[in-house]
Amino acid sequence: MPFVTQTAAGVRDQLRIFGRDYDTPDGTCIRDYIHVVDLADAHVQSLKWMQEQKRPSVDVFNVGTGNGFSVQQVIDTFEEVSGINLPYDYADRRPGDVPSIYADARKANEVLGWSARFSMADALRDAWNWEQRFRADQSLG
């Protein structure tokens, strides 16, 4: 996500997509992207859960939307929400990349009462707004 917004801001010349021949609908990797506010909320909910336990307890929770988005879908969605066409090219696959991976957040939902609330479009819009403010603040200081 930062590479997308940095490319839009001109910090990067272009975005590189690693692989376009994966066994996915558009050939690019599929990942579970989560809004930073949803991630922060998951942390807060897990801390509350820990405090509610009768004795110190540790557990593992996957957080995510439970939906995968391809790299190409992320780019296309960013272009829709921002109105900016991103320059990008394709590169060879990176060693170890899997075609598709996304979270099963059912346990977080059942135990913590947490689920992601924001969409991919929300995450990209908010990341772009943050990037613009960050770049503006950098130019002032």
Image: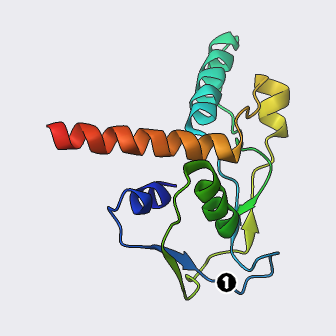
The structure's colour scheme is rainbow
Q: Where residue 98 sits in the image (x, y, percent)?
A: 69, 74
Question: In the figure, is residue 47 to the left or right of 136?
Answer: right
Count residues near mark 1 (Cα–Cα under 10 Å), then give few for <14, some for 14-19, many for 20+.
some
Place residue 96 in its image quadrant. bottom right
Q: Say which quarter of the image contains residue 76.
A: bottom right
Q: Residue furthest front?
A: 83
Q: Can you identify the residue that label 1 sits on?
A: 20
Compare residues 2 and 42 and report the one nearer the observer: 2
Q: Position of residue 66 (x, y in %)?
A: 80, 48
Count of residue discs: 1
- The answer to whether residue 17 is above or below residue 3 is below
Q: Position of residue 9 (x, y in %)?
A: 37, 56
49 over 141 or under it: above or below: above
Measured from the top left, where is residue 120 in percent x and y?
68, 47
Q: Horizontally, is 42 left or right of 128 in the view?
A: right
- In the image, taking residue 71 as reference, residue 11 lies left or right, namely left
Figure check: 26 above or below 57: below
Amino acid marked by disc 1: Arg
Give whichever of 87, 25 is nearer the camera.
87
Image quarter of the C terminus: top left
Residue at left offset 62%, top offset 83%: 19
Residue at the limit of the structure toward the left, as seen here: 141
Residue shown at 77% from the left, 31% from the top: 115
Occupied quadrant, residue 52: top right
Residue lying at 64% horizontally and 40% vertically, measured from the top left: 122
Say which residue appears at 35% left-offset and 67% top-offset. Answer: 12
> Element at badge 1?
loop
Is 63 on the left-hand or right-hand side of 139?
right
